[in-house]
Image (tube, rainbow, N blue to C red):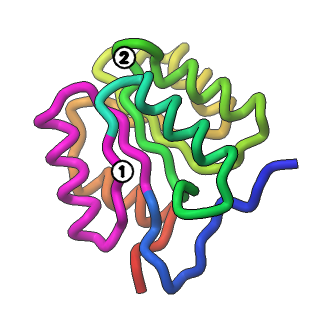
Amino acid sequence: MAKAMRRSIHHASRILLAEDDAEMRSLVAGALRLDGHEVVEVADGGGLLRQIANAMTSDGPAIYDLVLSDIRMPVCNGMQVLECLRQTRWGTPVILMTAFGDHRTRVEVESMGAFLVDKPFDLDDLRTLVLNLVPAAS
């Protein structure tokens, strides 16, 4: 059975952000922090997998309310991570970002209950999607 991955509304939502482009990662993380979210940043799929493994074995501060990941990254890609999360019944919302999206990818991502955002994207649209999925600090 999946762990409850929600935090109390009185705490900032924790977002795990995986993006191999340092400028993009910094831009997205900064915007999400301004919205009141706590953001943990990783630079590749290996870091993403390590953080998720820690969260799956922890009841403490390593729990995430949202995973936001690029699809194409070194070590492990976002689609592989999404498949792993869904196979283990980890129900945390997932948003995948890509500059190489096609109809097949979109259908595959959505069939696994995740969201796909095409790069380049409007940062305000991404922030709105995140806020609709997880609350900011109250």
Question: What SS does tag 1 mark?
Answer: strand
Numbered disc total: 2
Residue that label 1 marks? 40
**Between 116 and 30, which is closer to the camera in this rendering?**
30
Which span of residues is magenta-colored? 15-41
Q: Is residue 33 left or right of residue 93?
A: left
Q: Residues within 10 Å of mark 1 (few under 14, many from 20)?
A: some
**Between 121 and 92, which is closer to the camera in this rendering?**
92
Q: Is residue 32 magenta?
A: yes
In the rendered image, the vertical position of residue 117 relative to residue 21, given as above or below? below
Separation of marks 1 and 2 at Cα, in angstroms:
19 Å
> What's the mark number on residue 29?
none
Residue 46 in the image: state x and y as whole percent: 44, 23
Labels 1 and 2 touching (C-beta < 8 A): no
Outermost residue on the left side: it is 23
Residue that label 2 marks? 72
Kindly identify the residue that appears in the image at 26 percent across and 30 percent down: 119
User: Label 2 amino acid?
Assistant: Arg
User: Label 1 amino acid?
Assistant: Val
Kindly identify the residue that appears in the image at 31 percent across and 73 percent down: 36
Residue 21 in the image: state x and y as whole percent: 19, 27
Q: Is residue 111 left or right of residue 123?
A: right
Q: Is residue 44 left or right of residue 53?
A: left
Residue 103 in the image: state x and y as whole percent: 49, 17
The picture quadrant where one finds residue 85 is top right
**Between 1 and 95, which is closer to the camera in this rendering?**
1
In the rendered image, the vertical position of residue 90 relative to residue 80, given as above or below? below
Name which of mark 1 and mark 2 comes first in the sequence: 1
In the rendered image, the vertical position of residue 99 relative to residue 49, given as above or below? above
Residue 122 in the image: state x and y as whole percent: 21, 46
Question: What SS does tag 2 mark?
Answer: loop
For marks 1 and 2, give the one nearer the viewer.
1
